Image (cartoon, grey):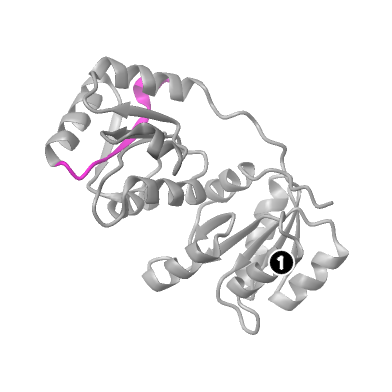
Amino acid sequence: MDESKAKILVVDDDPILLELLVETLTTIGYNTGKAVDGIDALEVLNKEQFDLMISDIKMPNLDGIGLLKKVRKLYPDLPVLFITGVNIPEVVGRATPDGFLSKPFRINRIEELIENTLKNPKKPKVKIKNILVVDDDEIFRDMLVDTLRYNDYIPIAVPDGESALKRLEEEGIEAVITDLKMPGKDGLTLLKEIKVKYPNLPVVLTTAFWDDETIQKKINDANPDGILPKPFTVETVLKLLSNIKQPNLN
């Protein structure tokens, strides 16, 4: 990647530091976006694609650690750098960003860290193949199956949670993508039952109701291995799946 053309999202509730960083990175040659806190950042990420995110840790509404956890699920390939004035060992115990910038920092230090992060992509992981798609919407289900098949996955589709559990007993499934709201057994119930029977099996939840804070809390409390807010792009689902390790089902 040509770092001079990389697109970077800067997240900070301090308006002075935010504008300074955006202006500095723009002058260096990066394309920049900005957000004033974690919630604002998620809204920006939902509309635009970025190559890297730089975030403060202490912010109102949704802090940097909470933002990082959501980004890891929603955009697993997006590198995240933290700007922090707090004790780094304390933060390391609660989150795993791709790098730190301790306040105060020099501009040449942030440029070096950005370049190193963009030049060193994550190591490739073993790609999963057999994916169970669970959704009562036949049109959406068929579309997702076709997308996965076209990209060399082996999808199996079922319309509900009970059918999904039966398939899991019969097939060598390596990951599950399930809708949240379905008649009978919903996605959260299915997720919990799968994790009891198959604790190492990755489960990704899809939902058209991600903007609902109550639903967000329920999903986060259930701790799925990934989240796909509808509508999502082909690139988004492929990136998420590429970040899932092949499970040990023995």
Is 129 drawn above or below residue 7 in the view shown? below
x 30%, y 26%: residue: 30
Task: Give the SS element for disc 1.
Answer: helix
Instruction: Name which quarter of the figure residue 87 lies in.
Output: top left
Which of the two residues, 72 or 155, is positioned nearer the viewer here? 72
What is the residue that sits farthest to the left in this orientation?
16
x 46%, y 40%: residue: 93
- In the displayed structure image, the side of residue 97 where residue 31 appears, left or right: left
Which of the two residues, 248 or 49, is positioned nearer the viewer here? 248
- In the displayed structure image, the side of residue 8 where residue 35 appears, left or right: left
Q: Where residue 84 sits: x, y (%)?
A: 29, 34
Is 161 drawn above or below residue 92 in the view shown? below
Which of the two residues, 4 or 56, is positioned nearer the viewer here? 56
Q: Where residue 175 sits: x, y (%)?
A: 71, 55
Which of the two residues, 238 or 39, is positioned nearer the viewer here? 39
x 30%, y 30%: residue: 31
Question: In the rendered structure, does residue 12 fall within the stretch colored magenta?
Answer: yes
Asked whether residue 1 appears in the rendered view, the answer is no
Asked whether residue 11 appears in the rendered view, the answer is yes
Q: Which residues are magenta?
A: 1-14
**The residue under label 1 is which amino acid type?**
Val
Q: Where residue 147 sits: x, y (%)?
A: 65, 53
Using a 10 Å C-alpha cutoff, classify the residue at mark 1 as few (fewer than 14 neighbours), some (14 to 19) or many (20 or more): few
**Residue position for label 1:** 196
What is the residue that sits farthest to the bottom in this orientation?
184
Q: Where residue 216 sits: x, y (%)?
A: 43, 66
Question: In the rendered structure, does residue 235 fall within the stretch colored magenta?
Answer: no
